Image (cartoon, grey):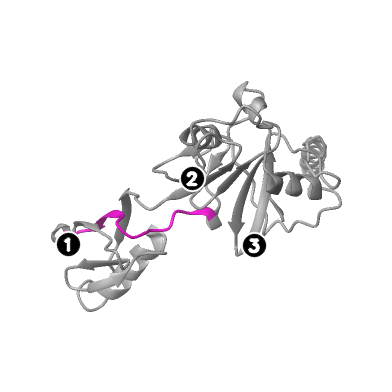
Amino acid sequence: MIRFLALGLATLLLANCATGARQPVETLTAVPVSSKLATSFLSPASNNLAPQQQYRVGPLDTLEVSVFLAPELARTVQVDGAGQISLPLIGSLTASGLTSQQVSDEIAARLKGRFILEPQVTVLVKEAILQRITIDGAVEEPGVFPIAGRTTLLQGVAMAKGVHPVADLKNVMVLRTVNGRSMAARFDLAAIRSGKEPDPELYANDIVVVDTSRARRIVRDFAPLTPLISVFRVFVPY
């Protein structure tokens, strides 16, 4: 009985190893990109958000605050121009620059012990105001545009009234700051429009550059090192 069990486990392990060996692995040769510093564009179907890209509260955002078993403390508050919110019992606190979870933790810490033994606080961003992206280069109306909710690359370009007739759709760069480092990824807008490639999501403070000298310089610097990455692009430092 033990012999048959051991044989079965060995067979299962070998099958798992074989299956793992067949998994496609995308590598970037010649570009030392740390997995902790690089972030990938997620497909539109995914709602996951990398921790470094979590939304951070900004001035004039509207927050919904609730405390479990303390409905009298529930409030819908707007962050003021200085990034502060004011709540019963705890007074003012700085919310701007924090994630909703960090705001929850701060409120809970101020309530704990003094007013509630073990407070469970939930903070939701009801309305985001100061989330902006920059669209530059060969578009009809370059500028800085506010975004609310999910915004893709195609939607961002549409905010700038579309691309200029002379734009090179194969060289559209998205610049992003990740953990204090400037990162870049190149996209083929024509392939995205035709449905051959996914439409990546843009995040607050992203800069989209369409066919400018800066975009061509970035492409020139990295093209000899990396191929155009298709479904999941990895940002590389620039």
Left or right of 97? Residue 163 is right
Q: Identify the mark nearer the N-term, 3 or 2.
A: 2
Q: Which residue is mark 2?
A: 143
Element marked by disc 1: helix
Q: Nearer the viewer, residue 35 or 198?
A: 198
Q: Amino acid at mark 1?
A: Leu
Quadrant location of the C terminus in the rendered image: bottom right
- The answer to whether 44 is drawn above or below residue 88 in the figure is above
Q: To which residue does mark 3 refer?
A: 181
Give me the C-alpha separation between circle 3 and circle 2: 23 Å
Say which of 76 and 169 sits in front: 169
Mark 1 = which residue? 73
x and y, in percent, of residue 84 in the image:
29, 68
- In this rendering, is residue 67 above or below 235? below
- Residue 117 visible, this angle: no
Q: Main secondary structure of the magenta part?
A: loop
Residues in magenta? 53-70
Q: Residue at x 21, y 73 (%)?
A: 91
Q: Residue at x 56, y 35 (%)?
A: 139
Q: Nearer the viewer, mark 1 or mark 3?
A: 3
Expressed as whole percent of the image width and height from the top left, the position of residue 109 reads 32, 73
Q: Secondary structure at mark 2?
A: strand
Q: Amino acid at mark 2?
A: Gly
Viewer-nearest of discs 3 and 2: 2
Is residue 148 something one can see in this rendering? yes
Dot 3 amino acid type: Arg
Q: Quadrant of residue 61?
A: bottom left
Which label sits on residue 28? none
